[in-house]
Amino acid sequence: MKKLLSLCTVLALVACAGKATSLNGEYKMLNAPENAEITIGFEGDRYFGQSAVNRYFGSFEKEGDKIKFGPAGATMMAGPEELMKAEHQYLQDLSKVTTYTLEGNTLTLKGEGISLSFEK
């Protein structure tokens, strides 16, 4: 009976751990347009970050190397026109992402015609 209880406990812990993502943490975009401060972070099934001027957040789903970002909510501050354009483009690109790779500290998000690279 103790072995069965121990096995059930281990299986429950493994099942809960499966909901965590290896993406956890925050990444900064490499070669961001207009030298904008663009970041993306992950915690559980939520994403968040700085999108040049505003903070943004939402939920995502992933399976294997496939990833789908839900709609982003964001603060609504105004900034310089070039940063607002960079932010708008980034959020549009993020909605098109379909796959990701994580090699060491480098995260690459890809979709049709886009490739966004970040470093932890």
Image (spheres, rainbow, N blue to C red):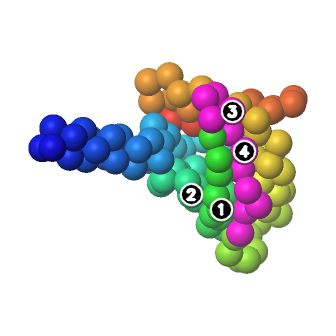
The CA span between labels 2 and 1 is: 6 Å
Q: Are marks 4 and 2 in contact (CB under 8 Å)?
A: no
> In the displayed structure, would residue 84 be above or below residue 104?
below
The CA span between labels 1 and 4 is: 11 Å
> In the displayed structure, would residue 27 be above or below residue 57?
above
For residue 17, side relative to residue 63 (left or right): left
- Residue found 56% across the figure and 32% down from its top: 107
Three-letter code, disc 2: Arg
Q: Nearer the viewer, residue 33 or 63?
A: 63
Q: Secondary structure at mark 1?
A: strand
Q: Secondary structure at mark 4?
A: strand
Q: Earlier in the sequence, mark 3 or mark 2?
A: 2
Q: Earlier in the sequence, mark 4 or mark 2?
A: 2
Frontmost of labels 1 and 3 is 3
For residue 2, side relative to residue 28 (left or right): left
Q: Secondary structure at mark 2?
A: strand
Q: Position of residue 77 (x, y in %)?
A: 71, 76
- Residue found 55% across the figure and 54% down from its top: 45
The CA span between labels 1 and 3 is: 17 Å
Quarter of the image with the C terminus is top left
Q: Residues within 10 Å of mark 3 (few under 14, many from 20)?
A: some
Task: Tell me the magenta residue range.
Answer: 63-73
Look at mark 4 in the image and give the residue it sits on: 68
Look at mark 1 in the image and give the residue it sits on: 58
Q: Secondary structure at mark 3?
A: strand
Three-letter code, disc 3: Lys
Look at mark 2 in the image and give the residue it sits on: 46
Three-letter code, disc 4: Lys
